[in-house]
Amino acid sequence: MRVMGHNALAILLAAIAIYAIEFVIFAALMSPEQYQAMTGYSAGNMDRMAVGVVPPILIAIGLSLVIKWRNQPGWLAGAVAGVLMAIFFAFATQLYPFVYGPNGLDFLAINLGAGLLCYAVAGAILGAWK
């Protein structure tokens, strides 16, 4: 099913993949206590996590736009687009909580690695289904 020239199923699958990768890294591989210690967030901030479904959807839609504009089909071209978007946009955004907030270098490294993986996998999914 296409919506304005974009494969809606690919966008949904890419968003689910992002959410699943983040779940494994930030929920299954680390405890809430570890997460709180690395980020400086308290248990009171954790009630906002329900909104966590929104960023993967927005990322998948944005990557779909970039991949369509690049007009280079295939999973590898999609993964490259995802990596580039991770480096130039996601990394820059994720540096703010490290520079101005409570996040430590350990969390920054994990967060940047997770972002790179998420964007690459989502880009590959979207590129393959372009």
Image: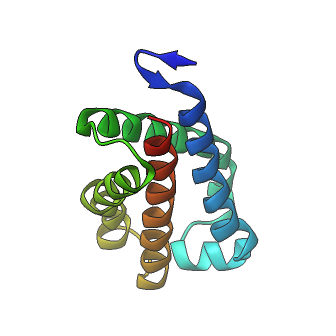
Quadrant of the image containing the C terminus: top left
Q: Residue at x 25, y 33 (%)?
A: 69
Report if residue 70 is visible in the image.
yes
- 65 up-or-down from 26: above or below: above
Q: Residue at x 60, y 79 (%)?
A: 37
Q: Is residue 90 left or right of residue 106?
A: left
Quadrant of the image containing the N terminus: top right
- 45 up-or-down from 112: above or below: above
Rendered location of residue 107, percent (x, y): 49, 77
Comparing 54 with 123, the one in front is 123
Rendered location of residue 34, percent (x, y): 66, 79
Report if residue 103 is visible in the image.
no
Q: Is residue 62 left or right of residue 37?
A: left
Q: Residue furthest bottom?
A: 106
Comparing 112 with 15, the one in front is 15
- 42 up-or-down from 64: above or below: below
